[in-house]
Amino acid sequence: MVDVTASTLQVAIEIFATSAFALSGLVAGARKKLDAFGVFVVTGVAAFGGGTLRDVLLDRRPFFWVDHANWIWLMLCVCMLAMLFMRNKHIQLTERAILIPDALGLGLYAALGTQIALQQQLPVIVCTLMGVMTAVFGGVLRDIFCDEIPKAFSDYQPYAVIAFLGGLLVCLLNQLNLASWLCIFIPAALMTILRILAIYFEWRLPHWKTESN
Amino acid sequence: MVDVTASTLQVAIEIFATSAFALSGLVAGARKKLDAFGVFVVTGVAAFGGGTLRDVLLDRRPFFWVDHANWIWLMLCVCMLAMLFMRNKHIQLTERAILIPDALGLGLYAALGTQIALQQQLPVIVCTLMGVMTAVFGGVLRDIFCDEIPKAFSDYQPYAVIAFLGGLLVCLLNQLNLASWLCIFIPAALMTILRILAIYFEWRLPHWKTESN
Amino acid sequence: MVDVTASTLQVAIEIFATSAFALSGLVAGARKKLDAFGVFVVTGVAAFGGGTLRDVLLDRRPFFWVDHANWIWLMLCVCMLAMLFMRNKHIQLTERAILIPDALGLGLYAALGTQIALQQQLPVIVCTLMGVMTAVFGGVLRDIFCDEIPKAFSDYQPYAVIAFLGGLLVCLLNQLNLASWLCIFIPAALMTILRILAIYFEWRLPHWKTESN
């Protein structure tokens, strides 16, 4: 995805993280009892929607899932198997199991997305938002397709906010002329740690001061 | 739309099919009691949304509705007339009347969409999904604009699945070096027949094995 | 945004109008009690979504908010302040206060959007719809993100219809070879006036003749 030596570590994290995002879509589809096609779309959108939207806005081609079409076949098989063998207890198990890989995905996607936008010499705030979009909009589209208010907009958890801070750090490290893999991995690691702390300590964003109406 | 001799037959089917897709939007808008603008948008999106999304992803221009702007004027008139003269019984009549042209649309759009993507040398699974998107995403966007879970995701009817199988057949026939009009019409006809059979015999996709929660 | 001498007046109106669109998003987010990220996205989408969608369809870059990235920082600050200091009474005050700037936005965005599309030599109906999209789709996306039927589709107020008529006028004036700033400002002013009259006299679009079901 970016011009760094694609170390085995990075590839491993990427597979890990994308799988977590995809599974969050699979679980959302299972909860809504979508049919085979619905589950497949929501899973795909959760995994690749953020990066695809970023690439449409930045006018980049080919998309990740066009370059790595095998992943789509894999996703197709996983969705089929899930429809056959998934039970309610698996849904809850899956949700707990993906918390850590999802935190890795948040960090890696936000850092990669920001770095990709920086290559186009865009303003800092735009690059940061492209990183946020990469990490968060798969989940947003997943929720819109399931006819719900996106969780990322309404659950008061520090998720996009962490992606935002991490994106700013990516921009800062690039200004300091660090090697590009360091500009990605330091913020990615920090975001992942911050996200895990946020889950563990149940941090919440400040709430509105309006009375409920 | 593609580089085949645009036979009168194809044009006739295209008009027929696009009208069916548009009418499905009109009916959805009427059921939700949208106002004139809402009905117009939902009708337009149902007719042209799938192909437009495909073209945005494939970075193709001009869109079908830019090349054939007269269709927009026609659609505008039909929407106005519908608001004036449509009664509830017409809604139900329309829904039954569009079943066959909608099946034609499914076949033709999926086959054309796949063929268009094949011209860009994309992987088989991506081309197939572009065909599915062309045939199905107009309806998906229509339902999202009406604030509902897309029917294509949740009604357990073999619709997108037929488009998927048909798209794979288009890819296969192209590999066999058949003339491009045959690569389109054979799968399109088969998909249409399969869809009509699916309606007639009320075929359903397999359901989740989870208990309802 | 277009090739006219960007008079101070135009810039002032643009700031005024974009702020009104942004505030409509802020208010929608506040009503739904979205969290900080949700409010920020819905505010941004309401302000820039219509123009961005138009630019994606017309394949134009850079987006307005990439060229004017400072606005994003400003928006970020306003959203933060709103979460800290906004009370229910402010929501209602804001909604009344933005009626006039919103009418200015409707006129200016629809006229500018149409003019931009005309530079690509597109058909009249397409240019007009691009203007409508510029003025209206920010609000549509705002409502979809808030999981509601878009108000522009369902409130029977002449809003998009005014944008449509104004867009046609922009096309007509261009055919008459008027100076491009006149092609923008005459229709923009007329649309704004028409919109204010529509609010004042509570004009409504004709309703469906179907019985409620």
Image (tube, coloured by chain):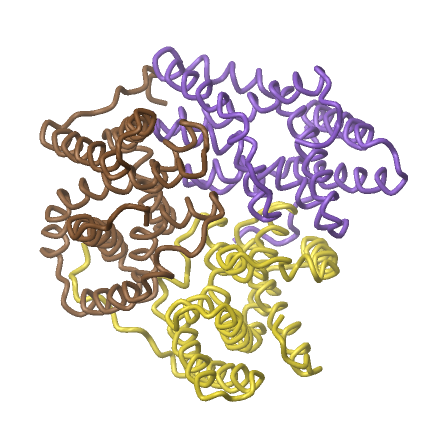
Chain colours: A brown, B yellow, C purple
- For this rendering, which residue is in front, C26 or B114? B114
Kindly give the residue lying farthest to the top in the view shown: C85
Q: Give the x, y percent position of residue C43.
A: 46, 28
> On screen, B163 above or below C115?
below
Q: In the rendered view, does A157 fall on the left or right side of C150?
A: left
Asked which quadrant contains residue B197, the reply is bottom left
Tell me what residue is drawn at x 53 percent, y 29 percent: C47
As drawn, C76 above or below B156: above
Is the residue B206 above or below the residue A19 in the image? below
Image quarter where the N terminus of chain B lies is bottom right
Residue at x 47%, y 43% (from the top left corner): A58
Q: Is residue C74 left or right of residue A91?
A: right
The location of residue A78, given as percent across then percent down, is 21, 65
Q: Please tell me which residue lies in front, C76 or A152.
A: C76
Residue C98 x, y percent position in the rendering = 58, 19
Residue depicted at 45% across the width and 54% down the height = A61
Could you tell me how many numbered marks the image carries?
0
Decide if residue B193 is on the left or right side of residue A106. right
Residue C50 pos. (x, y %) = 57, 38
Quadrant assignment for the C terminus of chain B: bottom left
Q: Which residue is the extreme one toward the right?
A: C176
